[in-house]
Amino acid sequence: MHLGRTTLSKFLIQQLDGIENARELGALLVYVAAAVKAISAMTAKGALSGMHGKVETQNVHGEVQAKLDVIANDVLLRSSEWGGLVAGMASEEVDEPYPIPPQYPRGRFLLIFDPLDGSSNADVNVSVGTIFSILRHDRPEAPLLQDYLQQGREQVAAGYAIYGPSTMLVLTVGKGTHGFTLDREIGNFILTHPQMTIPADTGEFAINTSNARFWEAPVHRYVTECQAGRTGERGRDFNMRWIASMVAEVHRILIRGGVFMYPKDTKDPGKPGRLRLMYEASPIAMLIEQAGGRASTGRQRLLEVKPTELHQRVPVILGSANEVARIERYHVEHDAGHDGPFVSPLFNERSLFRPEARG
Ligand code: AHG
Ligand code: MN
Ligand code: MN
């Protein structure tokens, strides 16, 4: 029965009321949704699409691209470049910002995206996603790199698509976080998860523990306490998940709570984290905050990090508000040197293995 359901278009007309350039923003979100439907169709075909596997190229991060990375990137660029809605675009898969071709008019928004998040999961038939961020560009001139480097709190809209057993689009325009499910028979996104809300407390955490030896002490402290469960400091058991698609972890957290961490580590001293600020951390942080959660680097609200580079990386700790606040407190206590009793002496700055720590 289709009558009475709220489609994405109807939702946007209602939701964008009162927002500057509402029509254009709504139309841009519909363009993005169209790209998402195309990517959804490709991922759902799996090996039958002929698009599985790697290509010979690497992206700006030195990562070998999957065929689907390249195609999803093209789909998003082609869907959004022609309609006079965007002034420019930027993507995980493209080194420099993408200028709008001269035959098309420029609009008032910048669209930034991770076309395929978790792409290593595509070949093993595990959920992947698309993440996007929309910023304003109010000058008539074509945007310069500097115009893209806005704090996350400047975003006018953010969202992700998850290509799982069902395809969902989850978005915010600063009025809550709302989830839509793709009805494949009629080709519409239907509002199925209005006003998503993250419980403030949780018993579930997500982190890649193979990086444990590179973590900072506050993260060790938190994870060690979770692992100790009811026999330790927390007095209750925790559960752990790691899918390696951030979109899928975040989706789980929006549905039932949890904490996701890809924290600062020392694996590669040149990189302060794994995830990228502009098209992974910032849009996801806006969705998390709009759903009542908390999103942090451990030492700063993610939405207040000032970007200096398009592809810069950032530590990410987000999810259920009370747990994230606790991890932030562990960072404060560590930085003030007040975390002694809880810290494993085997790791990090105050390590027994550092020469100055030995007696
Ligand atoms: P992408 O596929 O866009 O490069 O992003 C993958 C990201 C993120 O989705 C996930 O949380 C993380 O990388 C997984 O990293 P590990 O392989 O280090 O666990
Ligand atoms: Mn990604
Ligand atoms: Mn990606």
Image: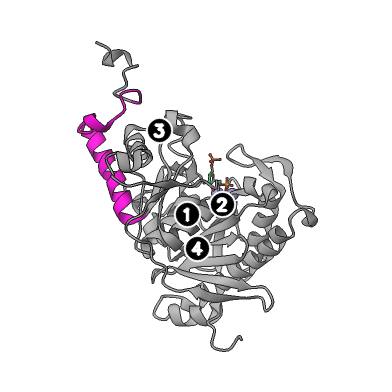
Amino acid on which disc 4 is placed: Gly
Q: Earlier in the sequence, mark 3 or mark 2?
A: 2
Q: Position of residue 237 (x, y in %)?
A: 36, 46
The residue labelled by disc 1 is 148
Q: Which residues are magenta?
A: 320-348
Position of 220 relative to 89 (above/below): above
- Cα distance between the residues tagged 2 and 4: 20 Å
Q: State the SS at label 3.
A: loop
Split into 4 quadrants, where in the image is the C terminus?
top left
The residue labelled by disc 2 is 97
Circle 1 crowding by C-alpha within 10 Å: few under 14, some 14–19, many from 20: many
- Cα distance between the residues tagged 2 and 1: 8 Å
Residue in the image at 38% along x and 72% along y: 175
Membership of 334 in magenta stretch: yes
Residue in the image at 43% along x and 54% along y: 282
Q: Main secondary structure of the magenta part?
A: helix
Q: Pick the residue in front: 293 or 78.
A: 293
Q: Position of residue 299 (x, y in %)?
A: 30, 43
Q: Which mark is residue 159?
A: 4
